[in-house]
Image (cartoon, helix red, strand yellow):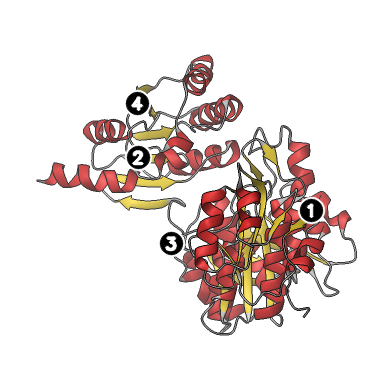
Amino acid sequence: MKTLSTSYIAEEIGGKLIGDNKSIEGIFTFLNAAKKGDIVIRHWINEIGIKMAVEKGVSCIITQTPKANAVKVAEELRLPVIITEKIELANAFAIKWAIEKFASESIRVVVTGTNGKSTSTNMIYNILKEAGFSTYSNTDSKSEFNTLIDPMVAKQIAEFNGKIEAMVIEVSEVQGWLDDIMKDHAYIMTSAIDPEVVVITNVALDHIGLVNSIEETFDETSGAVKALKKENGSMILNFDDPLVRKMKDFNPHKKILFFGDNAQINLKDEGIFFNDQIIIETRELPFKSHHFIQNIMAATGAALALNIDINTIRRAISSYVPLKRRFTIINSEPLIIDDFAHNPDGIVATIKNASIIGKGNFLVVSAIRGSRGEVINQVNAEAIAEGLENTSYKLIITSSKDVTDDLNIVNQDEKKVFIGALRKREIKYIFHEKLYDALEYVMKISNDEDIILLIGAQGMDPASEILKEILSLKNN
């Protein structure tokens, strides 16, 4: 591996080096975590950040946007700065370098798609661990460093405790900063990881504003397949999604495993099969809803591509514990289900799966997406209407005004378009500005036999903790 230097990094990421060419001994990391000799990657930095970096003994700063007097101060303090037009190239280089230095012999899996990639990634991780591999993943039950738009993955690989024998990395199918899309994100990051296996879960409309059509989403997502270069590489593709099915033609010389109805990996009454061989019986499945079954089949495909024993796959799947806010049950009487559903396909699937679970009333609490624009909120509201169609329900919506930070505040236009879409579809609802009030209300009107579904992204994240407080007060 070539020794790191400021000029070498600048050349590799198409950046401009300001300051001295110097050798680097540290790792890629964040400013607040940096130690002497490290390289800091930041989307933007000002003179205060430059001074902090110098105090920490940082070797180099890589940034896309130096603000105010950052460059002048860096020159005065003899701190090399690399300015790049695309910060994602710096993070991709950091990941590639970390893998080559600390995990060059590891087997690697990339998972991407609109829905289900976190669960599929985490399930593959569990299978690899069950198979005895010392495994790294950027998605786990406690935290999800899955955007790859910062140096977290490179940092974690460098600091991994022990040898990394396998890794499964979740890659965003579409990524951007504010309103600017990071074009070819999935391709760039998958190329940096250089996996043996690429898993595509599905293609659906999300990240509106970064992409504005399903065709654009398809183009971005398919980059992961196009980036599969290993001679023995395998693609695990969702046969039920016609757009994903088309991706087989983008890398026709690679091995392909399809999952879904009438595919090689499929669900029958008895369980999940690979061709005619049963992988896991229905009674052993950790969950039965359709979209989670697809996650299980995707993970099974990745494991089979890596020649992992079927008994190992079965043990890992049957003992799997879902990620937080993935159809998570947080109370039994009434049954309260918490799900991150944040885009149209996920919302419809989650509502339909939850609505058929029990015999009691079906109550839905949904958080409007704050600071994400009017379009995504309109299509999300329309998805709620579609999911509730032909269902007896009570719907409570909230802006979560009491718990959201500055990056997730629901503005009046977002609220207006969300409510307008519900009214257009003649969906009855009750609105509460505060998440606490919405949850307190739904608990007040519910009975022990009811089903309460909590859906939404950041605005619903604090719900489980708030419900603990509400339930505690109720029981006392």
Q: CA distance from mark 2 to mark 4?
A: 19 Å
Viewer-nearest residue: 54 or 366: 54
Circles 2 and 4: CB atoms closer than 8 Å: no
Task: Indicate the position of residue 166 as horizontal and vertical percent values.
Answer: 63, 77
Q: Tag 3 or tag 4, which sits nearer the N-term?
A: 3
User: If you read the primary sequence from the N terminus, does the residue marked by circle 2 or circle 1 appear first?
Assistant: 1
- In the rendered image, is residue 93 in sight? yes
Residue 140 in percent (x, y) is at 49, 64
Q: Which residue is disc 3 drawn over? A: 142
**CA distance separating discs 4 and 3:** 28 Å
Q: Nearer the viewer, residue 76 or 265?
A: 76
Q: Classify 68 as above or below 72.
A: above
Residue 393 appears in view:
no
- The secondary structure type at the circle numbered 4 is loop
x, y percent for residue 274:
69, 69
What kind of element bears circle 3? Answer: loop
Separation of disc 1 and disc 3 at Cα?
Answer: 28 Å
Mark 3 or 2, which is nearer the eye?
Answer: 3
Q: Earlier in the sequence, mark 3 or mark 2?
A: 3
Tell me: 361 left or right of 104: left
Q: Earlier in the sequence, mark 2 or mark 4?
A: 4
Q: Which mark is residue 452?
A: 2
